[in-house]
Amino acid sequence: MAAHQPLFPVSSVPWLTTGAALAALCIAWLAQYGFGLAPCELCYWQRYGYWAALALGIVAILQPARTPRRTVVLWLLTLAFLATAGIALFHVGVEQKWWEGTDACVGQIRPGMTAEELQAAIENAPIVRCDEPAWTMFGISMAGYNIFFALILAAFTAWGALRSGRV
């Protein structure tokens, strides 16, 4: 009986995940520059995870297949995608008012501020707030979709890391 062949060979995992990380960045840039959806602070934070994944993916591609070095890099790549999903989840929580965002997200206006402090807070307030989604589809923001995308990539990369030591 023939062994089950996976849809993708394990050797393609670094290539596919690196391409997917680049695609995520391109989609973010298209939304920003093509459709005028200005990113907030947490949007930028999510992009950092994809930049890290892009760099780690290139490192993984340069490692010989089925070696411990490639496996380690694939696990690091998995962590980069999980971190991105975590930041996206935090962002969705801020959008849904489940918790407060950072001061860089929503500004620093507090009760009891002096007139000078209030004026400084208003002048330094973020142009794009993290708690107001710039775009939604079916009630899900871009950060919400990013959770799913990053988790799928994390699972795929973890699968590749688990299988990379096998023939």
Image (cartoon, helix red, strand yellow):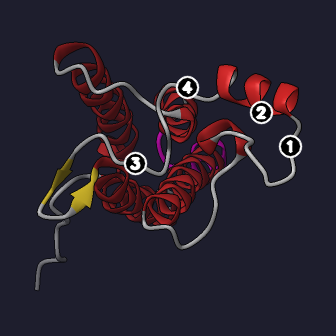
Contact flag, marks 2 and 1 (Cβ < 8 Å): yes
- The residue that disc 4 covers is 55
* 4 or 2: tag closer to the N-terminus: 4
The label nearer to you, 3 versus 4, is 3
Q: CA distance from mark 4 to mark 1?
A: 44 Å
The label nearer to you, 1 versus 3, is 1
- Location of residue 23 by image quarter: top left
Q: CA distance from mark 4 to mark 2?
A: 42 Å
Q: Residue at x 42, y 29 (%)?
A: 39
- The residue that disc 3 covers is 132
Position of the N terminus, as image quadrant, is bottom left
Position of the C terminus, as image quadrant, is bottom left
Frontmost residue, 71 versus 107: 107
Query: Which residue is most to the top?
Result: 33
Disc 2: CA contacts within 10 A as few (<14), some (14-19) or many (>=20): some
- The residue that disc 1 covers is 113
User: Of the residues shown, which amino acid type is indicated by label 3?
Assistant: Glu
Camera sees residue 56:
no
Contact flag, marks 4 and 2 (Cβ < 8 Å): no
Q: Secondary structure at mark 2?
A: helix
Q: Secondary structure at mark 4?
A: helix
Query: Which residue is most to the bottom?
Result: 1
Contact flag, marks 3 and 4 (Cβ < 8 Å): no
Q: CA distance from mark 1 to mark 3?
A: 24 Å
Q: Which residues are magenta?
A: 65-71
Query: Which residue is most to the front?
Result: 115
- The residue that disc 2 covers is 118
Frontmost residue, 83 versus 121: 121
Residue 115 placement (x, y as % from top left) = 83, 31
